Image (spheres, helix red, strand yellow):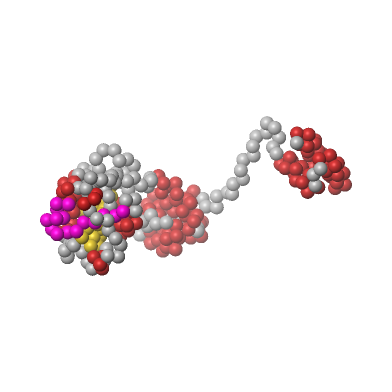
């Protein structure tokens, strides 16, 4: 094989410069010497010619020039933020409407001076996938990977039955799902606020409140406050396997009020799909993924949830 490869290397440069007739003669000699077919010999020579010269710098990959300018991207980021940070598939159809509205009411702020006719044309011609691609760095910086503070409460888990979907209890008002959202920002270290979300599976009725931390006493007090605000009685409560729910205080609270408790299967987040959707659409959309702590910020969040 070494001899064959040396033959290929020796013929490659001459083969590239040769005429059609000369190439044919070289191929005949190479095939006779190696036993290769003409197609194989031709392919080997072409492969050798594509190899970079020893010591030569590797060619940089060719990249398409950017179709949209920096000004258009800056304005796009501003519109995306003011529109509720939707994905590109939702932002593209409303771009013309939101751009006209924000410009008319002077809401573009620091990027208003960048909006020229050319930038407007770029924004209106931008596809949904292109918007997602240009917005990805900002979205990643603003919203890091979701952090979960759920820790299993194993000691009392056997006392709470697993919920089975489609039970008669779900076919009328009063069966609620509950979950918490940690307002921890980029880090779970230290103490930060939690929002409790309570959602009726049948009606979709949802209420929220904010508590100081995930201590059992605070969570139970928050749940009791939400239950007292409901327009109809709670009959059952379903939650995940987190320790803030699977504890003696919550079990005793439920027994005193004749409220049945059920839990989701471990690691099956879709079992509580109703409240998880509200967490995304209500809590994270309106309170974002910032870090909140202290009584002042808790008051602001509870004022927001009271709306």
Task: Using the rendered image of the protein, determine whether residue 296 is visible from the camera's viewpoint.
Answer: no
In this orientation, which residue lies closer to the viewer: 288 or 252? 252
> Quarter holding the C terminus?
bottom left
In this orientation, which residue lies closer to the viewer: 91 or 202? 202
Find residue 269 and report its horizontal and vertical position in percent.
34, 54
- For the image, the number of numbered tags is 0
Is 14 left or right of 90, judged from the image as shown? Answer: right
Task: Using the rendered image of the protein, determine whether residue 102 is visible from the camera's viewpoint.
Answer: yes
At x 32% / y 44%, what residue is drawn?
185
Residue 35 image-quadrant placement: top right
Residue 174 image-quadrant placement: bottom left
The magenta region covers 251-265
At x 73% / y 40%, what residue is drawn?
48
* Magenta stretch holds residue 255: yes
Find residue 217 and report its horizontal and vertical position in percent.
16, 46
Residue with the most extreme front position: 158
* Magenta stretch holds residue 114: no
Find residue 251 and report its horizontal and vertical position in percent.
17, 52
Residue with the most extreme left position: 256
At x 30% / y 65%, what residue is drawn?
166
At x 28% / y 44%, what residue is drawn?
151
Relative to 62, say whether 131 is above or below. Answer: below
Is 146 left or right of 29, judged from the image as shown? Answer: left
> Quarter holding the N terminus?
top right
């Amino acid at each position: 094989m070494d001899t064959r490869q040396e033959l290929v290397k020796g013929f490659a440069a001459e083969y590239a410069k040769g005429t059609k007739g000369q190439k044919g003669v070289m191929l005949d000699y190479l095939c006779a010497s190696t036993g290769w077919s003409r197609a194989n010999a031709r392919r080997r020579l072409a492969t050798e010619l594509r190899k970079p010269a020893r010591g030569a710098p590797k060619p940089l990959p060719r990249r398409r020039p950017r179709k949209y300018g920096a000004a258009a991207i800056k304005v796009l980021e501003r519109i995306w933020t003011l529109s509720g940070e939707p994905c590109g598939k939702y932002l593209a159809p409303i771009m013309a409407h939101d751009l006209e509205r924000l410009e008319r009411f002077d809401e573009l702020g620091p990027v208003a001076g960048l909006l020229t006719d050319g930038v407007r044309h770029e924004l209106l011609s931008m596809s949904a996938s292109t918007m997602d691609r240009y917005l990805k760095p900002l979205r990643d910086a603003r919203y890091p990977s979701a952090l979960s503070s759920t820790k299993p409460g194993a000691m009392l888990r056997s006392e709470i039955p697993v919920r089975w979907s489609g039970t008669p209890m779900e076919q009328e008002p009063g069966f609620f799902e509950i979950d918490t959202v940690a307002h921890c920002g980029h880090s779970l270290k230290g103490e930060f606020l939690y929002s409790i979300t309570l959602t009726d599976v049948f009606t979709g009725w949802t209420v929220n409140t904010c508590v100081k931390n995930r201590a059992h006493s605070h969570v139970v007090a928050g749940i009791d406050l939400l239950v007292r605000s409901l327009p109809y009685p709670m009959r059952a409560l379903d939650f995940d396997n987190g320790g803030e729910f699977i504890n003696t205080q919550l079990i005793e609270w439920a027994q005193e009020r004749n409220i049945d408790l059920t839990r989701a299967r471990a690691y099956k987040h879709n079992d509580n799909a109703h409240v998880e959707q509200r967490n995304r659409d209500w809590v994270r959309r309106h309170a974002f993924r910032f870090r909140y702590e202290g009584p002042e910020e808790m008051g602001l969040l509870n004022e927001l949830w009271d709306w």
